[in-house]
Image: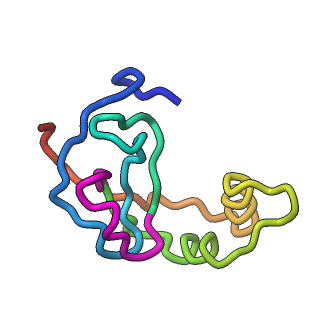
Amino acid sequence: GESIYGKYFKDESFAISHDREGLIGMANEGRPNTNSSHFYITLGACPWLDHKNVVFGELIDGQETLNSVSYTHLRAHETPEHLVCRLLLEKKKYTNSIQVYSTKMQ
């Protein structure tokens, strides 16, 4: 995908460590300032991502859903995206469950 800033945008800050589950960060292409529209949610501490990927938020609700995703096996020919949609539909539970950190652009 492409973000509202174009194909890539700059890293904001590496101040927050990947020290626990439920953190939301920007995925990049493995080099500085290559963020786009992809993100991830940590399932535990990921120190190898520190100073390489930016954490911009934290899950504040929906831990049950995150646990369901992390402990549920994919069905044959199912992608991770299909799994998340299937679990949400099965639970019929939609929550406002993301807290975005305010960080200053570098």
With 56 as the anchor, is 93 left or right in this view? right
Quadrant (top left/top right/bottom left/bottom right) for the C terminus:
top left
Placement of 6 over or under 62, stated as above or below: above
Q: x%, y% of residue 44?
A: 42, 76
Q: Can you tell which quarter of the image residue 32 is in?
A: top left
Q: Residue furthest front?
A: 31
Q: Which residue lies furthest to the right in this view?
A: 76
With 14 as the anchor, is 48 left or right in this view? right
Magenta stretch containing residue 60, yes or no?
A: no
Placement of 26 over or under 18, stated as above or below: above
Q: x%, y% of residue 66?
A: 54, 71
Q: Which residue lies furthest to the top in this view?
A: 6
Toward the viewer: 82 or 49?
Answer: 49
Placement of 98 over or under 33, stated as above or below: below
With 51 as the anchor, is 89 left or right in this view? right
Please tell me which residue is depicted at 39% across the width and 44% down the height of the picture.
Answer: 30
Q: Give the range drawn in magenta.
A: 42-56
With 9 as the anchor, is 87 left or right in this view? right
Q: Can you tell which quarter of the image residue 33 is in?
A: top left
Q: x%, y% of residue 78?
A: 80, 57
Q: Can you tell which quarter of the image residue 59 is in?
A: bottom left
Please tell me which residue is depicted at 71% across the width and 65% down the height of the picture.
Answer: 87
